[in-house]
Amino acid sequence: MAGKQDAPTAAVVVDTEGVVSGWSEGATLLLGWTAADTVGRPAAELLADPVPPGFPKDYGVGPDPTGFVPLRHRDGSTVDAVVTVHPLHGADSRALGHVLTVQRWGRRPVIADRAFEQCPFALGVYDPELRFLWINASSGRVIAHPEEQVLGKKYREVLPEFDRSLFPERDDKPYTDALAEVARTGKATRLITVFRPHGSDYANAWATSIWPVRDAEGKVRAVANWGFDMSAEYWARQRLLILNEASGGIGRTLDVIGTAEELARTPVPGFVDLVTVDLFDEVLRGEEPPSPPAFSPRDALTLSRAARHSARDDDFSLPEPPKPVSHAAGSVAARCMATGRSTVELTAQSGQGGEWAFGPGLAADPAHWPPGNPVIDESLAEDGLTGRITVPLRARGALLGVVVFSRRDRPEAFTADDLILAEELTAKAAVAIDNARRYSRERTTALTLQRSLLPQRLPSQEAVEVASRYLPAGTGSEVGGDWFDVIPLSGARVALVVGDVVGHGLHASASMGRLRTAVRTLADVDLPPDELLTHLDDLVLHLAGDHHPGGHFQPTGESGATCLYAVYDPVSRRFTVASAGHPLPLVVFPDGTSMPVPAQPGPPLGIGGLPFEATEVELPEGSLLALYTDGLVESREHDVDQRIAELLRALRPSATSLETLCDTVMDAMLLPDRRTDDAALLLARTHALDPHHVADWDVEADFAQVQQARQAAVDQVEAWGLAEAAFVTELVVSELVTNAIRYGEPPIRLRLIRDTSLICEVSDGSNTAPHLRRARAFDEGGRGLLLVAQLTQGWGTRHTSDGKTIWCAQALPLTSPV
């Protein structure tokens, strides 16, 4: 038996009839039979079992000329051997038979050869010119070429398609370049190659190692490689990369359309070739979407195409604005939205035996698909698609729309893992879209409240020509509390107001409304700007004290708000301004020079304890005033002084209409993508009242002067062509002058102003203010102011630094000359 173990390779010659004609010494050592025992006998008698399939009895060259064969030893035992058959030809190429080389299976070289041959990994050896020297069976199956067809041929000649990049965006290195680099440098390398095997509809990923084969002197004589299919792991990693990209790329903005675009762009082209996102119109408007019970799979649905992204350059990405898209009753999209379940559609592809050919990886097994998936739909091919996944877009129990992932430029069929990826992407986007929808609703509500609290139209008055603009913060930022106002005052004067409430959202808008109402109320009392801000500051302090931290309401935004209050008098052309922490207005004079109003801003509202200071300047007629909030000039890239200089430059073409100038300023100062705060702008061009429309007289503190004052007023009214107003003017002047003489102090002055109304003013040096009262039946007095109130449009009192002024206004007759 020792001979059996140490027997060398045996050689047996068999003629064309299958009869042994030669027997080597090695064969005797291996099987115990001598040449005398075997020559002339059929070779098949030496087999321990019947001839195995594929191994002909005459030992001719069959499908597998090298195979495992059990042979019979002379002592009756079985010898496991590997028999290799070689054809034997004569000098005239005539077939003489075969030479069989026999090796014991247990010998190390044979085991090694068979191990390499049966290795499940793809193995290959190439010379330095990349000619095939040897490949194993696994490698032959991968490249779809058996060894005898490729030996001696160059790699690029046999497999030119492997040099094409299957996914150009990944910049895969052609495999032949990697082989050539190892042959040239002698340095081993590892790489992952993505390619589509010959005849396969699926892209495989192979992990490959390439190393040099050196001789004893260290010279590279060949290049060897081995690789194994890691498609399941590779595509799982690619899915994780797409999900990771989605985590950082979807939901970056609180905008419904923008988030839908991010969802459409993320999986293209790494996962699919085309993505469409359809949303209900209610979602686009920030409203609650319809509930699923409101429709069934049998209902046709109309949505809006919010986003569309394709891997093809000739496809546009997004219709502007979103266009309606109809989904027919019973369609896949309608069923998915009604049932809440995703659907995978695939074109029919045949595998072995006519069964469905699934892609690589365990998830390709039909057992991993959810019920009802996949659906074989031949109509996809008519649309140029190889597969489609339809996923309902749901978040927090609400159905927002539907997302469709399509493949058309690659034949790979979707797997169950692909469905999971599509649903994960959709789920991430659904939450982000719902957040954007809720934010849009909140923002729309706050913006609606904000706009409703701002002046709907500016009041008619002659002191200044005005124009205004308000722009909320850009998408992704909440609405703030910026506001402005124009308030007509007594004596043909006008108040210009602009303010900014701390914070954003509904609370800021509500706070702005309260402040604007308070300013209008205080303006009706006709307080000077500094006193008005003092009263407003006290009001803010009281409002802040009404809200306790333990209450159910958030603190108001009035505390810390800023406000600028200015009064312009067209008679004297004086502009008086006071600021509570607000940016000062800018003035552009008729000659083109400009400057900020030289005033001293006080503290913001709600601080308390510090006085406000009023500044008065005289303006030439035609001066341009610009009142604004800090959202117009604040910037992260530039300081405030630089931005104010830019605003002054934008105001230079002051001769243009104020409406056009407002648009020019807003376009120059605010970029849509960088607007993080709301901004308000109020422009006013000053006018001066014609001196001929103002008449005044000094009145001595003597009741005898009342008749003269009445007559002077009537004469002036008639000179203005307002004879119809003479009677009421006479009564009003008589009553007001009489009261000033009786209850006031010198100096007493009467003034008539013809503006949009006829204004009568009587001033005196007393600070006592009259009040309206209803006289009893037998009272001799107390009816004067009641009479004035009944005969005029309005009356009031304003205090000055040296006394008070009682005023009243009459409507001008419609036929009065201008």
Image (spheres, rainbow, N blue to C red):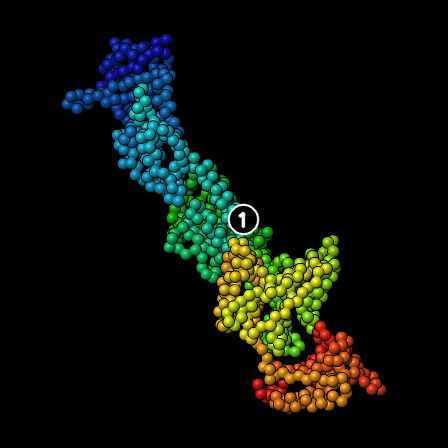
Residue drawn at the location 58% of the way across and 60% of the way down = 630
Residue 152 locus on image (x, y percent): 26, 30
Residue drawn at the location 72% of the way across and 74% of the way down = 802
Residue at mark 1: 427
Label 1: element kind: helix
Give whichever of 89, 608 is nearer the camera: 608
Residue 575 locus on image (x, y percent): 61, 71
Task: Please give left or right for residue 750 compared with residue 107 in the image.
Answer: right
Residue 761 locus on image (x, y percent): 69, 81
Task: Please give left or right for residue 685 compared with residue 156 in the image.
Answer: right
How crowded pointer 1 is (Cα within 10 Å; few <14, some 14-19, many 20+) is rated as some
Give whichever of 300, 483 is nearer the camera: 483
Q: Answer yes or no: is residue 555 visible.
A: yes
Residue drawn at the location 68% of the way across and 89% of the way down = 712
Image quadrant holding the N terminus, namely top left
Among the 4 quarters of the image, the one containing residue 562: bottom right
Among the 4 quarters of the image, the one containing residue 282: bottom right
Give whichever of 781, 187 is nearer the camera: 781
Task: Please give left or right for residue 457 compared with residue 413 in the image.
Answer: right
